Image (cartoon, grey):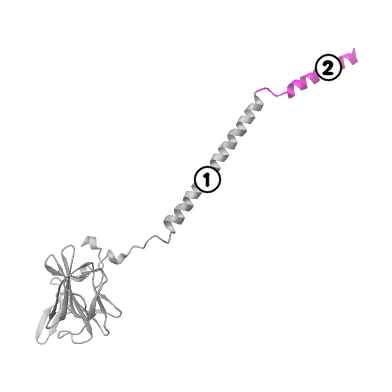
C-alpha cells in the first residue's frame, strides 16, 4: 500500500506539473502582437527623427549659411553724408536760431566785411575729397556761382533737395539720374572759403532750408 500510494502520488504530481507548464492559447498571439506593435513604433520614431533632422539640416544649410543670400545694402536705406574721404571735418555748422550764442557764433560765415548766417554745413579738408549724392535723385540744376563756384542741385523724393556748392571736376548735366553714393565731383576752393578744400552743403525740405544733420544717417522712409 505504501509503494502504491507513493507511485500514485508521483503520477498525480507529474500530471499537475504538465498542466502547469502548458501555455494558454491566447498567450503567444498576444506576445507576437505586442512585439510587432513595438517594432512599428520604433520604426515610426526613427523615421520621424531622421526626417526632423533632415529638415533642421536643410534649414540651417539653405536659410542661414547659404552664401548666395544677398547682403542688404544699407547705403540705399539711409541718408549718406555728402562726402567720401579721410580727415574731412565740419568747418562751419548750420546756423540755428534756437541754439545758444556760442554755437551761433561758430555758424557765421565771414566774407570780407560781411557776416552771413550759414544755411548749411561747410565741410573742409587739407586734401581734395569726393562729393557724393546723399540719396537717389535727379540733377535739376547745375550752374556756376561767382562766390561759391559750381553748384549742383539734386531733387529727391519726399520733397527734399540737396545742394552741393564749391564743386570741381563734375561731368554731370541737368536731367542726369544719380544714385546714393554717386560721385558728383570734388571739393574745391572758392572766394569765400580760400583755405583748404571745401564743400558747402545745404538741404531744402518742403521749400525751407534745414539743418542737414537732422536727416544725415536717418532712414529714408522716416524723412
The quadrant in which residue 192 appears is bottom left
Q: Residues within 10 Å of mark 1 (few under 14, many from 20)?
A: few
Quadrant containing the N terminus in the rendered view: top right
In magenta stretch: residue 10: yes
Magenta stretch secondary structure, dominant: helix
In magenta stretch: residue 44: no
Task: Identify the mark at residue 49; answer none if there is no mark.
Answer: 1
Q: x, y (%) of residue 54? A: 50, 49
Badge 2 marks a residue whose secondary structure is helix
Q: x, y (%) of residue 10? A: 84, 19
Q: Nearer the viewer, mark 1 or mark 2?
A: 1
Badge 1 marks a residue whose secondary structure is helix
Q: What residue is rendered at 74% in x and 24% in y? A: 21
Locate residue 59 relative to residue 77 in the image: left or right: right
Range shown magenta: 1-25
Q: x, y (%) of residue 184? A: 23, 75
Q: What residue is rendered at 54% in x and 41% in y? A: 45
Locate residue 169 relative to residue 68 in the image: left or right: left
Quadrant containing the C terminus in the rendered view: bottom left
In the picture shown, does residue 46 fall above or below 108? above
The quadrant in which residue 102 appears is bottom left
Task: Identify the mark at residue 9; answer none if there is no mark.
Answer: 2
Amino acid at each position: 500500500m505504501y509503494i502504491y500510494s507513493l507511485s500514485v502520488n508521483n503520477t498525480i504530481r507529474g500530471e499537475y506539473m504538465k498542466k502547469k507548464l502548458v501555455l494558454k492559447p491566447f498567450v503567444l498571439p498576444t506576445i507576437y502582437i505586442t512585439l510587432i506593435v513595438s517594432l512599428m513604433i520604433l520604426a515610426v520614431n526613427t523615421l520621424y527623427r531622421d526626417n526632423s533632422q533632415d529638415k533642421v539640416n536643410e534649414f540651417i544649410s539653405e536659410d542661414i549659411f547659404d552664401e548666395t543670400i544677398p547682403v542688404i545694402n544699407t547705403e540705399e536705406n539711409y541718408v549718406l553724408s555728402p562726402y567720401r574721404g579721410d580727415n574731412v571735418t565740419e568747418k562751419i555748422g548750420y546756423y540755428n536760431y534756437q541754439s545758444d550764442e556760442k554755437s551761433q557764433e561758430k555758424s557765421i560765415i565771414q566774407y570780407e566785411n560781411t557776416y552771413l548766417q550759414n544755411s548749411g554745413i561747410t565741410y573742409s579738408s587739407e586734401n581734395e575729397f569726393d562729393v557724393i549724392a546723399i540719396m537717389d535723385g535727379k540733377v535739376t540744376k547745375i550752374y556756376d556761382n561767382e562766390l561759391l563756384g559750381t553748384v549742383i542741385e539734386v531733387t529727391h523724393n519726399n520733397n527734399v533737395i540737396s545742394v552741393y556748392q564749391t564743386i570741381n571736376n563734375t561731368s554731370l548735366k541737368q536731367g542726369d539720374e544719380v544714385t546714393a553714393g554717386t560721385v558728383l565731383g570734388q571739393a574745391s576752393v572758392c572766394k569765400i572759403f580760400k583755405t583748404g578744400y571745401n564743400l558747402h552743403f545745404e538741404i531744402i525740405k518742403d521749400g525751407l532750408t534745414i539743418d542737414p544733420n537732422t536727416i544725415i544717417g536717418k532712414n529714408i522712409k522716416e524723412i
